[in-house]
Image (tube, rainbow, N blue to C red):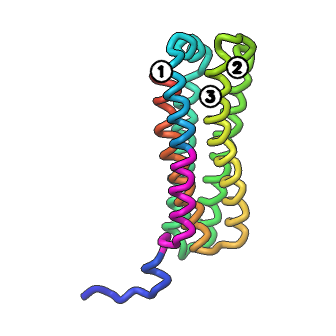
Amino acid sequence: MAAISTTEESDEGGDLLLWVLVWGELAAFGILLLGYLVMSVLHPESFALAKLHLAPRLAGFNTIVLLTSSWQAALAVRYQDKPQLQRLFLLLAATLGFVFVALKFVEYGSEWSATGDPNLQTFFELYFLVTGFHLAHVAFVGLLFVFASIRLERSTIIILTTVWHVIDIVWLVMFPVIYLT
């Protein structure tokens, strides 16, 4: 016989505001990526040349960092009955998010010199816009994970983890589109 769940338990992550946020984020990133793709079709030579200045291996490693961070966030949700572990997993998720940010800035540093070439300007404007928007999300939600670790509330952790997974999904689309095509 199935156990009867309370309203709070059965509505986890089902808040309308959460789903408006998730779909809004997906739409915003979708529009940015669509713009990037359209311009890459209109300017294939300059985009191909500009991509030679990117660091796909570093971005690949950063993908592993971001996914590992997401795993830690998922563990924080899983261990709701163990506050010390939950706090640890939230802080690990945040720390790995900040590692992603730091590595992205290292990557930006190596790419910055190529931005002065007028032939590559369109690519790098879009590249920094799309990846920078993603980076801002990683940094902001990472900071929210730190705050959430101070005051553990299940609903907050579920919302943040859901948004974190959306950020991952966006990166998993961005990575091959920008670095591997």
Q: Is residue 18 magenta?
A: yes
Q: Is residue 155 above or below residue 114?
A: below
Residue 32 place in picture, x, y as percent: 57, 38
Q: Which mark is residue 110?
A: 2
The answer to whether marks 1 and 2 mark residues whose Cβ atoms lie closer than 8 Å is no
Q: Nearer the viewer, mark 2 or mark 3?
A: 3
Residue 156 visible to an observer of this rendering:
yes
C-alpha gap between disc 1 and disc 3: 15 Å
Classify mark 1: helix, strand or loop.
helix
Observer-nearest residue: 53 or 127? 127
Q: Residue at x 52, y 10 (%)?
A: 45
Q: Residues within 10 Å of mark 3 (few under 14, many from 20)?
A: some
Q: Amino acid at mark 3?
A: Tyr
Extent of the magenta region: 12-28
Q: Amino acid at mark 1?
A: Val
Classify mark 2: helix, strand or loop.
helix
C-alpha gap between disc 1 and disc 2: 25 Å
Q: Residue at x 49, y 67 (%)?
A: 78
Residue 158 place in picture, x, y as percent: 54, 67
Position of the N terminus, as image quadrant, is bottom left
C-alpha gap between disc 2 and disc 3: 14 Å
Residue 73 visible to an observer of this rendering:
no
Q: Nearer the viewer, mark 1 or mark 2?
A: 1
| Pointer 2 or 3: first along the chain | 2
Q: Is residue 81 magenta?
A: no
The answer to whether marks 1 and 3 mark residues whose Cβ atoms lie closer than 8 Å is no
Residue 89 found in image quarter: bottom right
Residue 126 place in picture, x, y as percent: 63, 29
Q: Amino acid at mark 2?
A: Ser
Residue under numbered circle 1? 41
Q: Residues within 10 Å of mark 2 (few under 14, many from 20)?
A: few
